[in-house]
Image (cartoon, grey):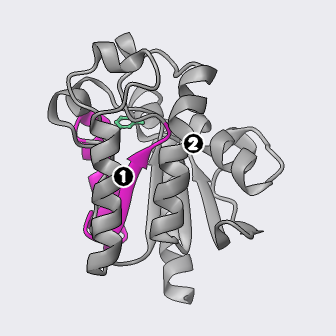
């Protein structure tokens, strides 16, 4: 990542750490702006920080994060190759779903992160991130059970041309073991896509 991009991302991250745009700031320990070396131009978007992420201020560091690391490793990637963030940057109490007003208040941060990073590929993890990307990129929404593992191409003036692969959330595969092979297969599709480029 070039120094200017890193500097701009850090500016956004500082704003996120001090954000008071929605009530989630009152219960957070740390906001979680996102991180990663982005060497392969892949942006991964999750839902919102959980307990461990809130404590550390870093994305995907709990159990779902361990599985994500393993999935990345299975296709020869590390966190240095991707940038990982979430739709909502502060933990919703008791890990409830983010409320629509919270998503709305937080969206400008993810919009700016995408504009600064200019990812070639976006991987959405779970239905919240998939829905967010559909709404922002003009992709017709289909349920995650239908959409996962498919390759979508979006072209917008604001974000340029981006390839999107929706996937199940790693936490879903921890609770429902049947989803694990599906997630592994979808990561193989990401691998093939990277090899094609
Ligand atoms: N789940 C998410 O969606 N994001 C995180 O950062 C951690 C768990």
Can the viewer see residue 185 in this picture? no
The span shown in magenta is 61-87
**Reading the chain from its start, which is encountered first: label 2 or label 1?**
1
**Residue under label 1:** 12
Dividing the image into four quarters, tell me where ligand 1 lies. Answer: top left
- 147 left or right of 58? right
- Picture quarter containing residue 151? bottom right
Residue 70 on the magenta segment: yes
The residue drawn where x is 34% and y is 21% is: 25
What is the x, y in percent for residue 75? 37, 70
Q: Which of 166 and 6 is in front in this view?
A: 6
- Picture quarter containing residue 42? bottom left
Q: Which of 107 and 78 is in front in this view?
A: 107
The residue drawn where x is 69% and y is 40% is: 145
The residue drawn where x is 44% and y is 75% is: 41
**Residue under label 2:** 129
For residue 38, the mark is none
Secondary structure beneath disc 2? helix
What is the x, y in percent for residue 36? 28, 62
Label 2, ligand 1: CB separation under 8 Å: yes
- 195 left or right of 70? right
Q: Residue furthest right?
A: 140
What is the x, y in percent for residue 143? 74, 38
What is the x, y in percent for residue 61? 22, 41
Quarter of the image with the C terminus is: bottom right
Give me the C-alpha separation between circle 2 and circle 1.
19 Å
Are there few (<14), some (14-19), or many (20+) residues within 10 Å of tag 2? many
């Amino acid at each position: 990542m070039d120094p200017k991009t890193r500097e701009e991302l850090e500016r956004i991250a500082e704003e996120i750490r001090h954000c008071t745009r929605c009530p989630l700031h009152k219960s957070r320990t740390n906001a979680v702006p996102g991180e990663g070396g982005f060497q392969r131009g892949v942006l991964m978007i999750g839902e919102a920080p959980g307990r461990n992420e809130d404590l550390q201020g870093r994305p995907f560091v709990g159990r779902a994060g361990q599985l994500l690391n393993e999935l990345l490793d299975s296709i020869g990637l590390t966190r240095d190759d991707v940038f990982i963030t979430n739709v909502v940057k502060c933990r919703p109490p008791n890990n409830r779903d983010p409320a629509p007003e919270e998503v709305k208040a937080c969206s400008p941060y993810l919009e700016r992160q995408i504009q600064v990073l200019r990812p070639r590929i976006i991987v959405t993890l779970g239905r919240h991130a998939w829905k967010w990307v559909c709404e922002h990129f003009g992709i017709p929404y289909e349920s995650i059970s239908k959409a996962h593992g498919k390759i979508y191409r979006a072209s917008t003036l604001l974000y340029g041309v981006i390839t999107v692969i929706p996937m199940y959330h790693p936490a879903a595969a921890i609770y429902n073991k049947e989803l694990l092979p599906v997630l592994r297969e979808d990561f193989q599709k990401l691998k093939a896509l990277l090899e094609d480029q």
